[in-house]
Structure formats: C-alpha cells, structure tokens
Image: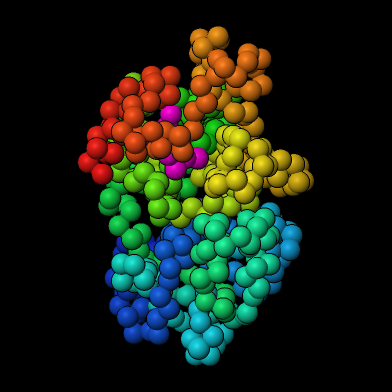
Amino acid sequence: MSKLVQPHGGKLTPVLLPDSERAAALAKAKTLPVIRTTSRETSDLLMIGMGAFSPLTGFMDQANYESVVATKHLTNGLAWPLPITLSVTEEQAKTLTPGMEVALVDDETDTYTGILTVTDKYKYDKVKECKAVFFTDDAAHDGVVKVMAQGDVNVGGSLVTFSQLGYATKYGEYYATPAQTRAIFDEKGWGTVAAFQTRNPLHRSHEFLCKIGNEVCDGLFIHPIVGKLKEGDIPAEVRLECYEVLLKNYFNPKNVVMKVYPMEMRYAGPSEAILHSIFRQNFGCSHILVGRDHAGVGDYYTNYQAQEIFDTFKPGELLCQPIKVTAAFYCSKCDGMTTEKTCAHDKEFHLKISGTKLRGMLGKGELPPAEFSRPEVLKILVKYYSQK
C-alpha cells in the first residue's frame, strides 16, 4: 500500500486518452468547430490532461471561476488559488452553446490537442481577476499582460485530450505524469517527498535548499518547469543540461528524482506557490520548498509573502506542506552556505546568490565566483551566453 499523500480531492482525474484512442479522437476533432488556444491555455490543457490539476477535468465554469477569484476555493470547498480558464472573443462566443463539442488547437504550433464539451460561457472582470491572483493590475506585470490580452468571454467545459504537444518525445524519460511519479516514489519506498520548483539553473543557494528538503524527507523531487517562460529566462534544454551535471556530481542519486512538467509560468508569486503545492501533491509530494520569493517577478511581492499565504488555509486543506526556508547565501565568515535565520554575520561577509544576478553577470560576459555556482554548471552557462 502506498505511503504517499493522497491526490488533491482524493484521486487523480487525468483526461488524456490512451494511445489506442487518440487517432479516432483526432479524426473527430478535425470535423468540429475550432477554438485556438494561447500557449498558457494549451499548457493548462496539458496539465489537466495528465492529471496534474486534479480534481479539474476541464476549464472552469462560471461558478467555479467566481468562487476561486473570491475565495481561492472551488465550489466544492477544495483549495484552488487561481483560475484555469479558456477565453474567446464575444463574436466567437455567440456560436457556442451548452453541450456543444469544439476542437482545441494550439495557436503557436497549429496542433489539435483536445475536445471540449461546452458547459457555459460567461463574461468576467479582468482587473478583478488580476488583483485576486497577482495582487496587482499593473500593466507591466508579466501575468497581468497575458490576462488583459485574453478574450472577453470565458468558456467552461469538460475535456478529453489526445496530445502532449511533443513534450513526451522531446524530454523522454524526464517527462512524467503524476501517476508515473507516484509509481516511482512507491517503488523507492518513499512516504515523504520534498518538491523543488525551479525555472532557473540551480545555483549554490538552490542546491542548499534542495539538500535541506532531502534531509527532512525520504526523497527529493526536482521538478523544473519546461513550458513557456518570459523573455530573458534560460531555455529548458540548457537548464536541463545544468541539472544533469549538478545531480551527477553533487547529489546522492538514490534519494533524488528529477522530472519536468509542461506548465507555463504565471509569475503569480503567493498564488502560484499554492498552485505548485497542489499539483505537487498530485505528483505524490508531501512537502514543497518555498523560499523568499517563490514564483515572483520584479518587486510585486514582499519577502516571504509566498510562505505566509499558506497560513491562510485551514489545516488539512493542503496535504503538500511548505518547507519554509529563509534566503540562502554564501558567508565567507561561516565559510559555507547559510541562511538569514542561521547566520548573524555582517552583510560584508555575504555573497547573495540569485538567478537574476547570475543571468546578469553572464549576459555581461562576467564569470561568477565559485561560491555562486558549481564550476560544471558555470561552464555550460558560459557556453550558452557566448553563443547567444
């Protein structure tokens, strides 16, 4: 019997069709009216398809959308921090009726990805959504930009999906569904698993946090996002090379699993930290490492706001609990990695490490110090930036 935490809502609810049924579903889709989806909508469809967004089995209807925006909970009472929606123009909405089937096509790749059975359509307040999700409606915020560019009408409905948009092929053994990671963790005999969310190459601070999680739990799950990022972020294939060399040289492979997932970042800070916790629970994780500015961007969120939001949910609502770690850095006085909580030395001894700072130095052709990142990782990044 599995020792892992249960999925959110009690069971996984994938809607990705078996290989044997996909050709017929695709043929049917090509006979249906089409809704073209943005990269964010497509990435959410992939997450729903694999069961990562369990218990969701489609895009949110009006009742669930409004409940999530107002209370960060679904209508059934389950915690859910932000809307998972599909939008269309008012003109296209006129052609949609409840019970109607429509094909979904990824707008960037022209790929048929699934079939939606419409339940309802509804107008929504974009500014209200942005303030609830991002805690700002500033037009410069990366997440706000995307919400404001959406269609004015949301379409709710249940899904079947039949494409993984090439992710399974591109990433091979590193691409895994929640059911697959749960099987891996069960085989290893793990009961507690610490997830580490990342969109950057792992520098020494990240490595330090990961090892804290590995000490606290039976195993560590490094789970990089490989969906669309904002301009300037390092491409997934470069980051993957960095992760591989770091795991090979500085971690015990018996106690670490690394897989990737196809979601697109929202940069929603605290709200996204809760989403990360919920779907890591679905992947089988009991804990998630949450640092100073989890899933943040710019200066939109205060230090540790992504940790504090967990305290607003009742005990038992989130089975994947945060491991709250203060900012990590190298201290020359301590002669090693430490944190704000454990080191009392003056700031003159501290080398603060961040992905933003790392990208900035490499972009200028500067080689960061050894205390910043492992030499094997820096070698890969220097090569990438020199080619860029």
Quick one: which residue is furthest to the left in this view?
387
Q: Is 368 left or right of 55, judged from the image as shown?
A: left
Residue 179 in the image: state x and y as whole percent: 46, 48
Position of the N terminus by quadrant: top right
Q: Quadrant of residue 382?
A: top left
Q: Is residue 267 above or below residue 320?
A: below
Q: Is 26 left or right of 50, judged from the image as shown?
A: left
Residue 199 counted in the magenta span: yes
Q: Is residue 336 above or below residue 105?
A: above
Q: Is residue 106 above or below residue 92?
A: above
Q: What are the residue bounds of the magenta stretch?
A: 197-203
Q: Main secondary structure of the magenta part?
A: loop
Q: Is residue 277 visible?
A: yes
Residue 379 in the image: state x and y as whole percent: 28, 28
Q: What residue sits 76% from the left and 46% below the top?
A: 312
Residue 152 in the image: state x and y as whole percent: 56, 78
Residue 225 in the image: state x and y as whole percent: 43, 46
Q: Nearer the viewer, residue 281 or 149?
A: 149
Q: Quadrant of residue 34?
A: bottom left
